[in-house]
Amino acid sequence: MTRYILIKILRSTFTLWIVVSAVFLILRASGDPLYSIFSLGTPESTLDVFRAKWGIDKSIFEQYVIYLSDITKGDFGTSFFDGQPAWDLVVERLPKTLLLGGTTFVISVVAGVTLGAIAALKRGTFWDRGIMTAAVASFSMPSYFLALLLILLFSLKLRWLPTSGASTWQHLILPATTLGLTLSGSIARFVRSAMLEVLRQSYMRTARAKGAPKWRQIVWHALPNAAIPTVTVIGFQLGWLIGGSVVIETVFAWPGAGRLFITAIGLRDFAVVQMFILMVASTVIIANLLVDILYGLLDPRISVIGVKK
Amino acid sequence: MSTQQTNTAAQSQDEPRIRRGRTGALLARWGLSGEWLVTAALIYIGFILFVAVFGFLFQPYPHTQMDLFNQLQPPVFMQGGSWEHIFGTDELGRDVLSRLIRGLRLSVLIGVIGTVIGAVLGSFLGIVAAHFRGWVEEVLMMLVDVQVSLPFIIFALAVLAFVGNSLTILIIVVGIDGWERYARLARSMVLTANQQDYVLAVRSLGLGNFRIYQRHVLPNIMGTLIVQATINLPGVILLESTLSFLGLGVQPPMTSLGQILGVGRDYLILAPWIAVLPGMVIFFLTLSIATVGDWLRDRLDPTLK
C-alpha cells in the first residue's frame, strides 16, 4: 500500500511539473507583456529598465530556470501591477472561493445523491424519467446563462436577492445555486447508475430476504456500496467546479480567486496567472490522489491490485 | 440497458393494439417509437442545422447593420414590438434575429470542427499508445493526466488572452478540449482488439499495420468513438459560448451565440431578450444533442454506460 501511494505521489508531482512548465512556456512565448502595460510611444529606454527589473530581458529558458528555482524557495513571483507577491494576492481571495465552492459542493452532493438514489429506486417510473431529464437539462444549460436567468428572476423582477458582491449570506445563494444545479445533475446521474448496479447484487437480495426494513436496506447496504464509484466521479468533478466557478464568480462579481484570474489575464499579469494555475492544478492533482487513496481504503480489493501492478 | 429491454418488451406486447400510421412506421424503423424526447431533439437539431447552413437566405438584415433610431426595440411578442424586427434589436439597433442566425452558424461551425479535431487527434493518439505500448504509451498517458489536472476552460482563457485571438486559434483551442477522452477510449479498445482473433488472423496473413488499423480495427471501434463525439459535442459548444460570453472567444464583427449573450448581459434590465433568446437557442441545442447522445449510447453501445 505504501509503495502504491508513493508511486502515485511521484507521478502526481511529475504531472504538476509538466503543467507548470507548459503554461509557463506558452504564456512567456506569447509575446512581450509590456505593450499591454505601457502606452504606445513609451521610450525604449523606459521599457528596457522595466524589462531588466522584472527579468524579462533574459531568454525564455533562463527565465524558466529562475522561475522554477524561485518556486522551490516559496517565491511565486510578483504582480506587474500592484507589486504585491502573487501568492498573497491569490491566497487572500481564496476564502471567498472556498466558501462558494464548499457551499456548492455540499448542496450538489446532498441533492445529487438523494435524487440519484430516488431515480434508481423508482426506476422506470415518472420520477426516474423526470429526475434524469432534469439532470441532463441541468448540465446542458450554460452556467452563465442560468446565472443571468436567476438574476433576472430573483434580483431584478422579484428583488429578493442581490445581483452581485459578497457582503452577506444572501449574496451566496444565487452563485451557489447556479453552480450547484449543474453539478448535482451530473452527480445524480452517476449515483443512479451506481445504485442500479448495487441493487442487482446478491447481498441486496440477502438483505431483503432477512427482512431488513426498506430504509435499512438502502442506507446500510446499498448506499455505502454505491459510494465507491461515486467518490471517484465526484473527485473528478472538482476540476469542473473550479473551472465553473471562474465563470460564475465573474458573472456575480464574487470577489474570489477566479475573478482575480479573469482580471489578471486581461492585464497579462504573468505572475498572478501562473500562481492561480499552479494552485488550481495542484488542488486537482492532490484531490485525485486522495480519491485514489480513498478508493483503496473504501474498497480493499483495489489496493491489492495496485500493489501487484 | 434492461430498461430498454423491458421497454421493447412492453411495446411488443402493445403492438397489435396500436395502429401505426406512416409516421409511426418510420419512427419504429429508426427505433424511435415511444422516444418522443429523442424525436423532438432530432427535429430541433435538424432545424438548427438547416438554419446554420441556409439561414443566411432568410436573414432579414445584415448582422452588423445598425439602426440608431431603433435601439433596444422589443421583439414582436412583447409590448412595443413590431414585425419589422421580429426578435427586436440590440443596443446599436442591430436586428437580433439576423444576429442569431449568423451567430448560430459560427457556433455550430466551431462546435463541429472543434469536436472533429478532438476526436481525430485523441483517437489517433490512443491508437498510437495502444500500438507501441512501452514508453510511448507512458508519455501519452502522462499527457492525459496533465490534461485532466487543469480545468480546460482556465487553460483556454489563458491561452486566448496571452497568445492572442483569431478564429483559427479559437477553433484549435476548443478542439483540444476532450481529446483525452477519445485517447483513453481508443487505447483501451485497440488493446482489446489486438488480442482478438480477427486482428490476429489478418496480422498472420501479413497485412501491414496501417491496413490493419484502417480496414479492420477502426471500423470496429468507430461506433463507440462517434457516440463519444456526440456526447462531447454539447461540451464543446458550451465551451465556445462561455469563452465568447467572457469576451475571449469570437470577436466582433464576427458573432456567435455566446458573444450575443455576453453583450446582452449588460442590458438585462432594459432589454432581456438580447441575452435570453441566444441562451435558449444554446440550451435547447446542447440539451437535444445530449439527449440524442445518451440515446445513441444506450442503443449502440451498452458497454460505455
Image (cartoon, rainbow, N blue to C red):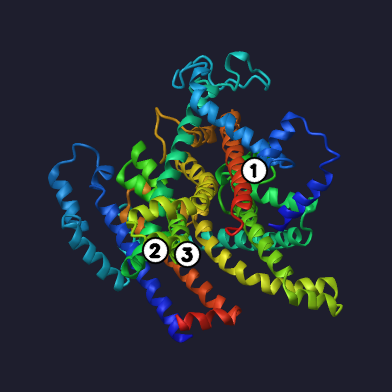
* Secondary structure under the numbered disc 1 in the rendered image: helix
Count neighbours of disc 3 (C-alpha within 10 A) and say few if under 14, some if 14 to 19, many if 20 or more: few
Give the residue at mark 3. B196
Which element type, helix, strand or loop, lies under badge 2? helix
- At which x and y percent is residue B67? 48, 15
Assess disc 1: are there few (<14), some (14-19) or many (≥20) residues with their C-alpha within 10 Å of its C-alpha.
some
* Chain containing mark 1: A
Quadrant the C terminus of chain A occupies: bottom left
User: Which residue position holds label 2?
Assistant: B130
Q: Secondary structure at mark 3?
A: loop
Dots 2 and 3 on the same chain: yes
Farthest residue in the left direction?
A: A45
Residue type marked 2: Ala
The correct choice, above or below, for B42 with respect to A127 in the image is: above
Q: Position of residue B76 (x, y in %)?
A: 65, 19
Q: Is residue A263 visible?
A: no
Q: Residue furthest front?
A: B205
Chain containing mark 3: B
Chain that bears disc 2: B
- Tell me the CA gap for discs 1 and 2: 47 Å
Q: Give residue A117's mark.
A: none
Tell me: residue A113, above or below residue B74.
below
Few, some or many C-alpha atoms within 10 Å of disc 2 (few <14, some 14-19, many ≥20)? many
| Disc nearest the viewer among 2 and 3 | 3
Apparent side of residue B213 relative to residue B54 in the rendered image (left or right) = left
Answer whether labels 2 and 3 touch (C-beta < 8 Å).
no
Q: Nearer the viewer, mark 1 or mark 2?
A: 2
Q: Give the residue pinned by disc 1.
A: A150
- Name above or below for residue A148 compared with residue A177: above
Return the x and y of residue B274 as percentages of the image width and height: 56, 29
Q: Is residue B173 visible?
A: yes
**CB-based contact (under 8 Å), mark 3 and mark 1:** no
